[in-house]
Amino acid sequence: MTVGAGAWGLGVFAKFSQGGFEDPKASSTLVAKLGAGYFGSTNPDVLVLYSSDTLTVDDPRYMGAVITTVARLPKDRVAEVISYWSFDAKDAAPFASRDRHKTFVSLKLEGKDDATKLASYEAIKERLEAPGLTVRLGGNIPLGVEFGEQVVADIIRAETITALPLLALLIILFGALVASLLPQVVALFSIVGGLAVLHAVTYLTDVTSFALEVVTMMGVGLAIDYSLFIVSRFREELARGMDAAGLPPGKPWKRVEDRERRAAEKRAYRQALDPVRQAALARTMSTAGRTIVVSGVTVSAALAGLLLFPQMFLRTIGLAGIATVMVAVFGATVLLPTLLALLGTKVEGGRMPWRRPGAKRARRDPDSGFWFRLGHSVMKHPVPYFAVVLVILGVLFGPFLNVQFSSVDARVLPKDSPTRAVVETVKREFPNGSAEPIDVVISGDLIPRDWRPARQGDNIPPYLEDFREKLAAAPGVTDAKFTGYSGTYGGVRISVTHEYEPMSSQAQDLVRDIRAMTLSKDGFPMHIDVGGSTAGQMDLMASLMRTLPLMAITVGIATFVLLFMFFGSVVLPIKAIVMNVLSIGASFGAIVWGFQYGHLAGVLDFTPTGGVEATSMILILAVVFGLSMDYEVFLLSRIREEWDRTHDNRAAVAIGMQRTGSIITSAALLFLVVIGAFSMAGITVVKLIGVGMFVAVVVDALLVRSLLVPATMRFMGAANWWLPRPLAGLHARMDLRERDDLPGAPRPAAAPLDAPARPATAPRTQSHGPALPGIAPAGPPVPAGPSVPAGPPVLVGAEVPPAPFAIRWEQAPDEAPDEASAPRPRYANGRGVSGAERLVTGAERPEVARPFPRAAHAPQDPRAAPEPALPAPPRPPGRPPTSEDASGPPAGTAPGAPWAPWANGPPRPRPRRDIRIKREIVPTPDGSGWRWRDSGG
């Protein structure tokens, strides 16, 4: 899948579209489309800037070099050429710089879409060099090409910068080299898969190149976050299961000198480890895996809110983000568990000194660490913590009250950008270069078609001239002239230049005044559409403000339903949404302070524009909401797990924080490394998004999740888990909570205590795992007796694996058990026990030694179920007898006669319960297997 997705995903780089910030249904968008299709765009596809240090545009040599160059351009690639020499002296003035050493040529390329125009640009860009002159290229197409190239360069730089720091941090956090490599494998899979899905999306709709940044940023960040939770939980469960089974870490068989014995102990160790590994992985996926799926769906729900906006930029970012999140979830819940299943204890490979057995950090009590103490402190003094955090969040949010929104222009590119230099040169050195006209398109049935006064000498109708004069007389207007006539559309365009800044309130008032004008002829009204950068920004803001409430309602309802299904509470989802809004507000304030006010311009090397780009703020709103909910789900899921176990609110919060605090902080730190690299990108919009997400993650991890959430949970107490009775039944059918009660192996149903006994001749096989060499596989019959539930051996509790050794049970041929006097066996606590330890009502409880001693450093879980003893490993064939085998068979056993426990029937009840009889595993007399031997009471 990775190889195929990589090969397919690379094709997305040739499929990106430009722009996408406008509302497709807005009046300004219609004017732009009419300009591109009928009137000629006021923003050229390619703007070629020629300059000379010695010659002026009035020199024939200057004119000859430019005219000769553009005249040789292929006509099938260039639809229109406009230059200084295309007009008379008065109209040509805007095409020459004030010092007359520079001029520009405007080219309109052939093609109906960006891809065709891009192909035309690639065909002519090498043919625009004029002899003796310096040439630089600008305009829409070169700007889009450089934007895409800068995006790829930013991604390569970010990945290069973050690779080693991420690996170093993962090694520090995991304490093992192999474990630290797994999140990066999942991150690579997420990026490749995200690109493949994004390539598929390009066949359905236009996709902006900026989506590539989002795929990389979220693919790496979320994949590492999710992998951190999965790997951490797996290692926790694996260590707990190994401790319960008495399996020491490392490779204990290496201490054995005898080769055959070492091989046997190695096989026995691995067979004993296999069910522990499977149980650890099953519990990991039923807890952390379930949480990650819910978290991924919640993040996707937040990003799905972007699909409600009509802007192509936001819609494609939403699609790209959802695809990346789902691929990251797939990698964390399918690819990563597969790797963990293959690795097992090898996940600890390359262990660092602080993770080795006996290290001080390894012996640390998991329920009494820093986060446990912090949780208790917050729960003890909630008011001071709550007040201080709210003050900090209020200060961070303050600058957002003065926000000003601006549009995307060439200033988002780096300062050394060649296309940006062309735009700035034209604005600075050419007459009217900084003027951005307001385009007014008048259309209607009374405007004749195929009408071009500029070329055919047709007179302009008086009512159109009167309207142009009315526009020219508006306050602040410097000129209004006809700049386009439609041959087939039936319309005319008037460009209005003014003395205001494009995004100023005066310019916006002028647009409103023009839109309020009316025009009619003989009682037939004319349509007036207003475009240009000012009108476009106004339409964009109106569209965003119109759609934002719908997005908030939709995402809020979807998030509430998901969290209700997961937590089984009405209060917690509402509180989680409020907490996320606080994090978003803090990040918005930081963006305004850094970018609108320009306080970060020196540090991040960008040009302040006096505002912030509006669509980027909407994108941050969706992404930050999803990320904040990500951490909220991780924290509250563990708190809910403890609440279900103890129903103690303070203890649940403290333990939940201890179990997730370090992981959430580590995940946030790793995500900050990724975001920090993108904050150093060359495109200002990417810097803005990086800084906004950086601040939001810091605030969320250090203030909201660590202090504000536990303080509010202390205030509400048991009300956190309030679930009205009418909703309780609904939640029971929708419950998505974590499950931590899985057995270590399949648990068969216990037979009723009054089940009929098996016939005396009915054999029963008992198997405790795969057979080892020299150990008979399960097969010979067991003495008949009370009914025992059939099926594979199972565990006491949820943490002890079955005994790994196959035992041959033998029955004396001439003796039958006394069924009438035999007590009926039962399973401890209604569950199963391993075949090595059957608890019999009123009778003996056989006891055998553990196969491996308990690791001295492993912590005990006070909530764990009592652990049964496991059988000792058998002596491999050929090994000389040791002191453990010296006791020999029981007294009275004939030489060579088979011996079997309970040959005369199960032991009879004794006055006292739980009297223990030790048994040993010894070779059968014929050397074909192993058997139990009673070594005394």
Image (tube, helix red, strand yellow):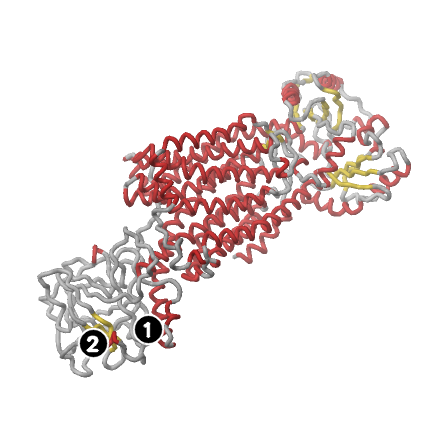
Which x, y percent locates residue 600? Answer: 60, 35
Residue 563 sits above or below residue 478 on the image: below
User: Residue pushed farthest front?
Assistant: 360
- Name the foreground residue: 444 vs 558: 558
Which x, y percent locates residue 33? Answer: 67, 33
Q: Position of 365 compared to 465: left or right?
A: left
Provide the residue designation for mark 2.
887
Number of numbered discs on residues: 2
- Name the foreground residue: 637 vs 487: 637
- Name the foreground residue: 155 vs 657: 657
User: Residue pushed farthest right?
Assistant: 60
- Residue drawn where x is 78% and y is 31% of the image: 429
Q: Position of 915 compared to 559: left or right?
A: left
Q: Is residue 282 visible?
A: yes
User: Looking at the rendered structure, which numbered label has been put on residue 772?
Assistant: 1
Q: Secondary structure at mark 1?
A: loop
Kind of residue sitting beneath label 2: Ser
Kind of residue sitting beneath label 1: Leu
Q: Position of 114 compared to 190: left or right?
A: right
